[in-house]
Amino acid sequence: MARWLPRSTDLTRFCQKLNRVKTLEDDMMETSFNRCLSTIDLTLLGIGGMVGSGLYVLTGTVAKEIAGPAVIVSFIIAGFASLLAALCYAEFGARVPKTGSAYMFTYVSVGEIWAFLIGWNVLLEYMIGGAAVARAWSGYLDSIFNHKIKNFTETHVGAWQVPFLARYPDFLAAAILLVATAFISFGAKVSSWLNHVFSAISMGVILFILIMGFVLAQPKNWSTQEGGFAPYGLSGIMAGTATCFYAFVGFDVIAASSEEARNPQRAVPRAIAFSLGLATGAYILVSVVLTLMVPWHTLDPDSALADAFYRRGYAWAGFLVAAGSICAMNTVLLSNLFSLPRIVYAMAEDGLFFQVFSRVHPRTQVPVVGIVVFGLLMALLALVFDLEALVQFLSIGTLLAYTFVAASIIVLRFQQQKGHVPAAAAGGQPNPEPHEGPAGAELKEYESFSDKLQLVDRDKSKEQREPGQLKAAFEPYLEFLSDFYPGEVVTVAVVTLMVSAICLCSILVFGNTHLHLPTWSYSLLLVLFSLGFLLSLLLIWAHEQQHSTQTFQIPLVPLSPALSIILNIYLMLKLSYMTWLRFAIWLLLGLLVYFGYGIWHSKENLREARPQRVSARYVVFPGGSLEERLQAVQPSSQPAPRLPDTDTEACKR
């Protein structure tokens, strides 16, 4: 019986396979894509992904049903919360200018299986998101013509009464997706130009809404006679924040496009900052105008802006609002269809997904197979499926991606840079750097079986501590942590921080409602998990991190990513249990794909299978004279030579 049980070495090797990270190329600017997108192109892509139908529908819905005129405050808080996640994407997009967005960022820092699951969820997120926007686009256009399209379809095709299927096939939604797919397949420049046109029209309509809205504004609509500025109180503002947060989820299209940016180190952070700032400003100002034009409790949640102009006697303005809404939805469709094939390409290029999706068209320089296949799948979803029950998948997939990207920022920031031989862990000394030749002109580094061999008796006050090592100021108090390999303590602390955040948010969300905890235990658990979160944060902060002036870096690490993590986890736990159930089923399907295909075809797996050239390394320990001399490294087939001097001794490992 015992012989059928896996050995501990096999389990260790298996876990190492699951958590291996992607090896990046030396020249990360080399690509098969066309680097043709400027900062303006990326900015407009980000605006198109964020300022969609939500501007015309979400503002009225939150104002009437959740927060009242205080929807303005909800958008301000949601914009700040989104900024935390956006800054994490900006740093990664500048440091790793490769397509793949959250999938790629997780792969280079956390591990392979986590990256695959993030990519797998982002695929579904983009497919459902694109199909849902296409149906909204179709419904909005149909409403302008008094639902003639819907009535014609139900009369001549028929209506369905089947669970998970739409009431009638939406041919218009499928058609717009197929047309958009055709344009996207022509290349990044064509897609960008088309996005420019629709974004310009949309921003022009928004400018018209703001000017006309402030002309028609009536401050009495915020007065106590109409219910006041915050009729639902602080709880309404925070509930509105949770809903408004999803209005900003489109900025990751910029990170997904970084491999097609001319200068991603500068363009990606700037484009994310500009697009998020403009989108936040648009949502806030439109909310101000909307709630000042008409009383908030009389708004029509389905078409708040058009209805507000109609009630103020400007029915013609409703047509401009409708045109702006349709153009805004077009930009969201382009954003989804632009990002999805590139994430699939990144997964296929790494061997984790089917290789056919890694093919790039030689002329247009886009992953045309992925564009066509997933464009057809998106059109099929929009044609026959009822997407209302699946829309919350957008939330959980996005929030999970934000959480892992924030955790990846912490892990990567406290790792040593690529190509640098790690310093010794025990005392924090750098690796031995033997002299080249007798003159001792240039220092060189040599391969070793263990990077923990070190020179002794160095002056610690003069040493340069590496990322992941304990700061010198904390060593007298946390000396026992100096024995760990650089970055190990930080990795454990990040895991502890995420577990503490999950437990803390679970108590906040379910403690009084589902668990019915008494007050003393509720308070005690909150204190314990808050302490665990803060102690993990302090432990991470006590270690050295990378400092680079060449690319953008998010400030206040690890505090900023940690706040993003706890906020994202809190919002995920607020989702319904049915969303979590569907999410679990989708994850199981993803694990089947990974263990059936991805783990075996992974490029990292193939790289591990290649024979590695092993060489020995001699570490010279200084004797009384504290002189360092180089001992030549010989091939394994040759005996080790004798050291020339008696005041040094060599240790071969």
Image (spheres, helix red, strand yellow):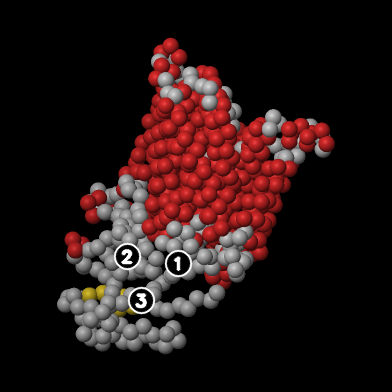
Which residue is painted at 82% across and 38% down in the image? 157
Rendered position, 512 above or below 174? above
Q: In the rendered image, which residue does mark 1 sit on?
A: 29
Q: Residue 271 placed where, x, y %?
A: 42, 51
Q: Is residue 390 visible?
A: no
Q: Residue 608 placed where, x, y %?
A: 54, 69
Query: Which of the marked residues, 2 or 3, is nearer the chain's N terminus?
Result: 2
How far apart are the alpha carbons under marks 1 and 3?
A: 28 Å
> The residue under label 3 is which amino acid type?
Tyr
Q: Is residue 533 visible?
A: yes
Q: Quadrant of residue 317?
A: top right
Q: State yes or no: discs 1 and 3 in contact (Cβ < 8 Å).
A: no
Q: Secondary structure at mark 3?
A: loop
Q: Secondary structure at mark 1?
A: loop
Q: Quadrant of the C terminus?
A: bottom left
Q: In the rendered image, which residue does mark 3 sit on?
A: 446
Rendered position, 56 above or below 409? above
Which residue is painted at 63% across and 39% down in the image? 137
Please name whichever residue, 591 or 271, is drawn nearer the observer in this view of the structure.
Answer: 271
Q: In the rendered image, which residue does mark 2 sit on?
A: 423
How far apart are the alpha carbons under marks 2 and 1?
A: 29 Å
Q: State yes or no: discs 2 and 1 in contact (Cβ < 8 Å).
A: no
Rendered position, 329 above or below 167? below
> The residue under label 2 is which amino acid type?
Ala
Which residue is painted at 73% across and 43% down in the image? 171
Which residue is painted at 56% across and 71% down in the image? 609
